[in-house]
Amino acid sequence: MERTTTQTAQIRLALTSQINSGLLQSGMKLPSERELSELFGTTRITIKEALQSLEAEGRIYCEDRRGWFVAPPRLVYNPLYRSHFHEMVERQQRQASTRVLSVRNIVAAPSLCQELELPALSRLFQIRRVRSLDGRVVMFVEHHLKPERFPGILELDLSQSLTGIYQQHYDIHYGRSRFDIVSTAASGEVAQALTLGEGSPILLVSRVNYDQHGAIIDSDHEYWRHDAVRISVDSRPG
Amino acid sequence: MERTTTQTAQIRLALTSQINSGLLQSGMKLPSERELSELFGTTRITIKEALQSLEAEGRIYCEDRRGWFVAPPRLVYNPLYRSHFHEMVERQQRQASTRVLSVRNIVAAPSLCQELELPALSRLFQIRRVRSLDGRVVMFVEHHLKPERFPGILELDLSQSLTGIYQQHYDIHYGRSRFDIVSTAASGEVAQALTLGEGSPILLVSRVNYDQHGAIIDSDHEYWRHDAVRISVDSRPG
DNA sequence: GTCATCCTCTGGACTAGGTCAGTTGTGATG
DNA sequence: CATCACAACTGACCTAGTCCAGAGGATGAC
C-alpha cells in the first residue's frame, strides 16, 4: 500500500496529464463519477474530491446531472473598459450570446443606494441577464440604472449591448469606472442561472459606471463562473 | 421528514445567522466537525459540505487540524498601486507582517521569460515571501527581478517593503503596471505556505511592473487566500 | 412527422462508520 | 521553573453503500 501522495492527488494528476496531453480536449465529457470510481478503484466521494479540486483550478467544470467536462480557455476581460461584450468575445475568436432574464422597476436595497449615492427608498431599473460563451452560460449580470436618465429603456430590446443603447438612444458615454472583485460563492438565483450548485466558488465583479461628465449612471454586478474568466488590467492601455 | 431545502442549506443558514448576529465573532473558533454533526444530527460529510460552502463564500476558514474559524473582514487592495503592503494594511487599522521564505538566483522558466520579455535561459532573482494580516497568513508571493538592475539586493533585509528598497537603494520608481487575476486552486508550496489543503480555491494576482521610464523591472505572483481580499480598482484615483 | 411517455444515465444528497497525522494542553520530571 | 512525553482532540482522508431528481434518448401512438 503505497502512500507517496494521497489518492486524490494521484487521480488529479492522472486527469490533468490526460488534459495536458490533449487526449481530453476542451469541451469533452469525462467518464461518469461511477465509472471513474471503478477505474481508479475507489469511492465516488474520493473521485468527487479530485474532480472538485480540478474544478477549483479551472481545468474542468460540472453540468448538473449531465457530467463533467474539460473547461475551455478563459476569456480575457478588462473591467475598466465597459466594452461591448459581444465585440470583446469575438475579438477573441469566440462566440457570445445574451439572454434577458427579467426587467423590473424596483425599490433600491440599502446597499445599492449607498453604491449609487442615492437617497433611501429610491427607485431603480433592474435588468438581469445571462451571457454565454460558445454556448455555455458563464456570467449572470444584474444592472441597476437611474430611471430618470433612461426613460423608456425597459421597452427596448435589452439583449443587445447596453453600452450601445446608452450611446444611440441617450447619448451617454462611459467615463471613469470603478470596480471591486471578490471571490465568493453562488447562491439562489445566481447558482440557478449559472447552473452551479449552491456554494460553488464564483467571481463577483461589482462596477459603478460614470458618464463623460463624471456623474454616476449605473452599476453592474457580474457573477462569473470562476473558471471562465481571466481579469486583465493595464494601467496604461495601449 | 421536511425537505423545504437541503440539510446542507439549513446548516449553512444556521451558521450564517449566528455569524451575522455577532454571536460568532471574527476569529472565533467554531465547534469541531464532530460536535457539529451531533448538534445537527447528521454526518461529518454533510457538515463538511456546509462548512466548505461557507468557506467558498468567505465567511469562515479552516486551519489544518486546528479547526474552523470565523473569517475576519477582507483587506481592500488595489493592485494598480504597488504600495507598501504594511502601509496599506495599517491604513485599514490592521496589523501586517512579512516573512522571507527563500531567496535564489534561478534560471527563468519559459513562462517567466515571456512575461518579462527575456531571452530563453535568462537568470533571475527569485524572492519568496508570505505576508500575514493580524497574525494570519493571507498571501504567498513570488517576486522575480532582473538581476542586472538589482546588484546585491539578495544580501539586504528582504522582509521590508521591496518598493522601499527599490527607491532607496536603486532609485527605481514604479510607473505603469499590468496585472491579471485568475481564480484557481492552491497546490504544492503555495498550499503549504498558506496552510491550505491542495485544491482550495485561491486568487492569483500576477503583475508585471515597469519603472518610471517604461522598462520592465520585475514581476510578482501573489497567491491570496480567496476570503482575505477584496480587489478594488478605480480608473481615476481620487 | 409530431408529441408524449418511459427508461436509463447522470450527478446531488446523504448515512455510518473507519484510520491517520498534526496540534494542543496537561502533568510528570529534571 | 523549564522541559519533555503523552493523551486527547482536531481535521484529513478514506470506504461502501442508499435514495432522489433532472437530463436526454428511445419508443410508440397518433
Image (cartoon, coloured by chain):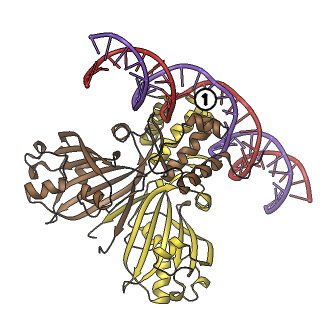
Chain colours: A brown, B yellow, C red, D purple
Q: Quadrant of the C terminus of chain A?
A: bottom left
In this view, the residue in front, A161 or B77, is: A161
Q: Is residue A148 visible?
A: yes
Q: Chain of mark 1?
A: B
Corner quadrant of residue B31? top right
Q: Quadrant of the N terminus of chain A?
A: top right
Q: Is residue B70 visible?
A: no
Q: Percent x, y for residue A78?
A: 32, 63
Amino acid at circle 1: Glu
Q: Percent x, y for residue A52?
A: 53, 45
Q: Which residue bears the numbered disc 1?
A: B38
Q: Is residue A166 left or right of residue A111?
A: left
At 40% from the left and 68% from the top, the residue drawn is B179
Corner quadrant of residue A170? bottom left
The answer to whether A83 is drawn above or below residue B103 in the figure is: above
Q: Percent x, y for residue A229?
A: 39, 56
Q: Is the residue marked by circle 1 packed among few (<14), some (14-19), or many (20+) residues within 10 Å? A: few
